[in-house]
């Protein structure tokens, strides 16, 4: 039965992120070289508890951590958690340990696990706490709010158990208006109780173009929101198949260069555990930076050499010294994302693509000429036997809307093979989408057929 509220539906967009984060090994366990963290399928709630990162710096764990910085003249809060009981418990902990009053509430980006708890802070806002956000936050939230039905249908494919794709009420936090907007190139510096703060607006904060970093120069502590995503270290999620705007690789490199320039001794991301090993911080940030640079350089070189985006998706691989987890961001999707970010949707492959008649407008003709859907299924089986599940899938897509049991059975076999292969990278979105297709295929086959 589906009667979940809109806010839960929308928070599903970060459910996968949180699940990944929960499953990620803790920093002490992670080697920078070649370690691929585990993935879990379920949204697992982290215990709501305060960890003292260093004197006066706290991480309050939750489904989206909240950070607290205490000073003699009050406190600064970074992010507000997700809009459920988790953030209510986090807020109660902060009420206990925060130096009063709360002077600033800094939001690192628009995702619901970061701004969803903002309505709990009305009293502090009324008492003068200033809400600080990136200048692009309202824009990013606006896209989510205006195209909510569109996005919910997509999230339902990846997180089918968490999404009510029929929800229509836009959560209030997506309409938030900050008291102060921070612009890229114009850091917001302030001092509170002798503690210096610098709020830095990136052009690509890892999970969108509205990412803020919070730097405490005296402590050399850097709070980064989701700059590095839910796993650490990982290849960044520069293109989300759930459907957010392209995330610019060059802007991401700039953001990581800024991190390296600041040279933090404490690195505090929202989801993975905070890091205090200076050598490890430098080595891992450098590796992530260099991996994105490598992907970019190879993509541009391939474009200049006249290669297609399909060729580059297949060919480009990270060299051994730049290997990173692709459990969240996937390299080949970033290659395609970088290509389209540079040049847009027209690939000079067919002038037919300049017009509105889609390729599948003639798929029925092809299937008929082939002798019907079962003939398509037969040929797909040939590809499957030759270990080419993607070729099989392309053929079977011709028979979309005309499926017979042999077509569905071949499709299920292709998807099972792809799922087996996907286990190597363990990419959450890839596996979610393959599973969704497989489930639908089996449903169409009906009971008794596997
Ligand atoms: Zn997050």
Image (cartoon, grey):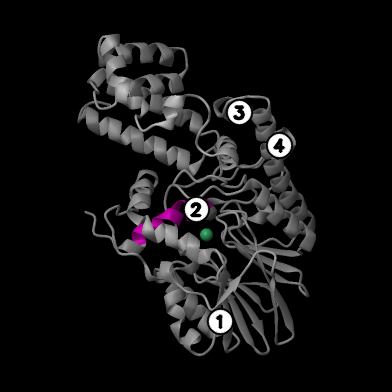
Picture coordinates of residue 24, whole percent (x, y): 57, 51
Measured Cα–Cα span from mark 4 to mark 3? 12 Å
Where residue 17 is drawn, which disc sits there? 2
The reply to whether dot 2 and dot 1 touch (C-beta < 8 Å) is no
Residue ID for mark 1: 130
Part of the protein shown in magenta: 8-20
Mark 2 or 1: the one toward you: 1
Labels 2 and 3: the sequence-earlier one: 2
Circle 1 SS class:
strand
**Between discs 4 and 3, the one toward the N terminus:** 4
> Is 121 above or below relative to 244?
below
Pointer 4 residue: 297
* Residue at horizontal 56 percent and vertical 47 percent from the top: 237
* Residue 158 visible in the snapshot: yes
Binning the other alpha carbons within 10 Å of mark 3 as few (below 14), some (14 to 19) or many (20 upward) gives: many
Label 3 or label 1, whichever comes before in sequence order: 1
At 39% from the left and 68% from the top, the residue drawn is: 84
Quadrant in the picture for the C terminus:
top left
Distance from the alpha carbon under mark 3 to that under mark 1: 47 Å
Q: Earlier in the sequence, mark 2 or mark 1?
A: 2
Dot 2: few (<14), some (14–19), or many (≥20) neighbours within 10 Å?
Answer: many
Secondary structure of residue under mark 3:
helix
Foreground: 332 or 137? 137
Q: Are marks 2 and 3 in contact (CB under 8 Å)?
A: no
Whether the magenta-drawn stretch holds residue 328 is answered as no
How would you classify the magenta stretch by its main secondary structure?
A: helix
- Percent coordinates x, y for residue 437 in the rendering: 35, 34
């Amino acid at each position: 039965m589906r009667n979940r509220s809109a806010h839960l539906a929308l928070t599903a967009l970060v459910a996968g992120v949180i699940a990944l984060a929960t499953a990620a090994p803790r920093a002490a366990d992670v080697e920078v070289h070649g370690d691929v963290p585990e993935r879990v399928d379920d949204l697992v709630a982290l215990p709501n508890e305060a960890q003292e990162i260093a004197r006066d710096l706290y991480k309050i764990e939750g489904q989206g951590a909240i950070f607290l910085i205490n000073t003699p003249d009050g406190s600064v809060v970074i992010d507000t958690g997700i809009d459920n009981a988790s953030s209510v418990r986090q807020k109660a902990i902060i009420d206990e340990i925060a130096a009063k009053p709360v002077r600033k509430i800094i939001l690192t980006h628009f995702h619901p696990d970061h701004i969803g708890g903002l309505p709990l802070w009305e009293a502090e806002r009324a008492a003068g706490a200033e809400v600080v956000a990136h200048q692009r936050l309202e824009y990013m939230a606006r896209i989510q709010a205006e195209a909510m039905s569109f996005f919910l249908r997509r999230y339902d494919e990846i997180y089918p158990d968490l999404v009510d794709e029929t929800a229509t009420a836009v959560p209030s936090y997506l309409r938030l208006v900050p008291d102060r907007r921070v612009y890229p190139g114009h850091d917001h510096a302030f001092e509170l109780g002798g503690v210096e703060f610098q709020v830095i607006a990136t052009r690509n904060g890892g999970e969108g173009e509205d990412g803020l970093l919070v730097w405490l120069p005296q402590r050399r502590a850097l709070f980064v929101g989701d700059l590095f995503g839910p796993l650490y270290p990982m290849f960044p999620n520069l293109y989300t198949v759930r459907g957010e705007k392209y995330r610019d690789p060059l802007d991401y490199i700039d953001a990581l260069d800024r991190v390296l320039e600041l040279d933090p001794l404490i690195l505090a991301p929202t989801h993975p555990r905070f890091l205090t090993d200076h050598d490890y911080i430098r080595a891992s940030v450098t590796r992530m930076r260099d991996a994105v640079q490598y992907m970019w350089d190879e993509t541009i070189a391939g474009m200049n050499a006249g290669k297609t985006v399909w060729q580059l998706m297949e060919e480009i691989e990270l060299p051994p010294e730049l290997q990173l987890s692709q459990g969240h961001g996937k390299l080949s999707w970033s290659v395609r994302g970088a290509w389209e970010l540079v040049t847009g949707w027209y690939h000079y492959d067919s002038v037919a693509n300049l017009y509105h008649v889609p390729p599948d407008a003639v798929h029925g003709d092809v299937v008929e000429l082939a002798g019907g859907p079962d003939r398509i299924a037969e040929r797909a089986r040939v590809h499957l036997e030759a270990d080419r599940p993607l070729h099989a899938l392309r053929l079977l897509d011709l028979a979309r809307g005309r499926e017979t049991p042999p077509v569905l059975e071949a499709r299920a076999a292709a998807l099972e093979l792809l799922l087996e292969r996907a286990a190597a990278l363990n990419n959450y979105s890839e596996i979610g989408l393959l599973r969704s297709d497989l489930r639908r295929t089996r449903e169409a086959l009906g009971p008794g057929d596997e």
